Amino acid sequence: MLKRLIILLAVSISGLAIVVRSGMGLGFHRIKGITVVAPPQPFKGDPFVDLQKLPCQWVAIVPYAYTPANKPQVKYNLEGWQWWGERREGILASIQMAHQAGLKIMLKPQIYVHGTWTGALDFKNDSLWELWEMAYATYISDMIKIAEEEHVEMFCVGTEFNRSTDTRPQFWIKLIDKIRHNYKGLLTYSDNWDHYRQITFWDKLDFIGISAYFPLIDIGLPLPQRLDSAWSGITDQLRNYSSAQKRQILFTEFGYMSCEGAAGKSWELEKILDDCNVNEQTQADCFDALFRSCWPEKFWAGGFVWKWYPEGMGHEGFPEKDYTPQHKKAEWIIQKWYRAD
């Protein structure tokens, strides 16, 4: 009888650990985060002080590696070519400074694929795929070593590899298993807003990660009521999916550009950004609608605003129109909600 009670207790504790680890249990604190762009040069001061004022509790550190067009390679940590914040020294310094500021960290290494979107990355045969997978696994292994050594709280194993996750899911399952063996923190994967239901390995991770660029309404200057209406259908779908997967949903990226049309298809707007009209109010209204719609929902674990330029470094033109909320009306909206509880 005693042996049976011990077994039942062990199973109960194990199940509780899984629930709490996935963010579905009592005591979970919503992630109030922002993505910090990896800068080209070392910081002159402490850029994380401003983030404490938002008040952020988490930051995503996002170093990029590089896959050349049609080549099964992953290039990274290249002196004289990559930005300082994308190389090991910059990643370490960024993590250490963020921790010193009292912030938790998600390390989110990403891949820039020359000439195409990451989700369209493809190779002609299995041999080429396997070469790329070995290169990517080596890259991630090096990033995991940093994450474990620096006690990084969360790690994102990949971002928007649609073709790869569709056709070669076993690679990702094996990679996650290997990471689990070497890393004690939380794990997620970042999938695109229109593809997350195709992922077959959410059960291996702690959160369903979504790049939450849901198109809301294709109007230049939408009314707040129209934004709320658009979010209603989205939250219904997310709530149902979260329940089915028994995982909370983390917006690994979310944000809007500060120009007319920001509530629509952001990836199309990016192509014509130089011709767009600046409109901070539209950006602020879109953020406000997202928070109004998602904040009451138990399925929503929070997320990371895209994106913040530390000391103004890292933008590639048009910061007054792009995603950053810095020194714009949206910054005050984020501050209002991040102070909410």
Image (spheres, helix red, strand yellow):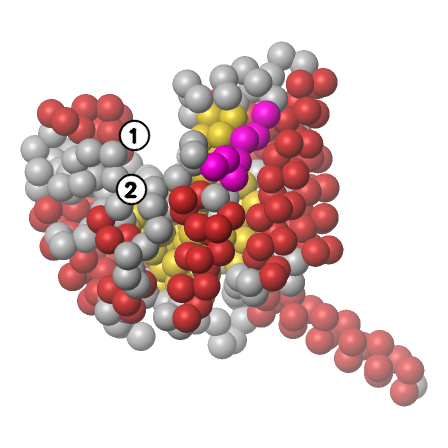
Residue at screen point 19% across, 24% down: 272
In front here: 333 or 307?
A: 307
- Residue 79 visible to the viewer: yes
What secondary structure is the stretch in magenta mostly built from? Answer: loop
Q: Quadrant of residue 29?
A: bottom left
- Residue 216 visible to the viewer: no
Q: Where does the magenta region start and end?
A: 73-79
Q: Is residue 122 above or below residue 196?
A: above
Which residue is denoted by mark 1 in the rendering? 267
Residue 28 rendering spot, x and y as whole percentages? 48, 71
Q: Indicate the amino acid at tag 2.
A: Gly
Is 76 within the magenta? yes
Is 192 within the magenta? no
Residue 128 rendering spot, x and y as whole percentages? 67, 18
Residue 1 rendering spot, x and y as whole percentages? 92, 86
Q: Quadrant of residue 130?
A: top right
Residue 44 in the figure: left or right of residue 186? left
Residue 184 rendering spot, x and y as whole percentages? 64, 63
In front here: 52 or 339?
A: 52
Asked if labels 1 and 2 touch by Cβ distance under 8 angstroms, the answer is no
> Distance of mark 2 from mark 1, alpha carbons?
19 Å
Residue at the farthest top position: 124
Q: Indicate the amino acid at tag 1.
A: Trp
Which residue is denoted by mark 2 in the rendering? 314
Residue at screen point 40% across, 68% down: 103
Residue 245 in the figure: left or right of residue 125? left
Determine whether the residue tagged by mark 2 lies in a helix, strand or loop.
Answer: loop
Residue at screen point 62% across, 46% down: 142
Determine whether the residue tagged by mark 1 lies in a helix, strand or loop.
Answer: helix
Residue 74 in the figure: left or right of residue 45? right
Residue at screen point 67% across, 50% down: 179
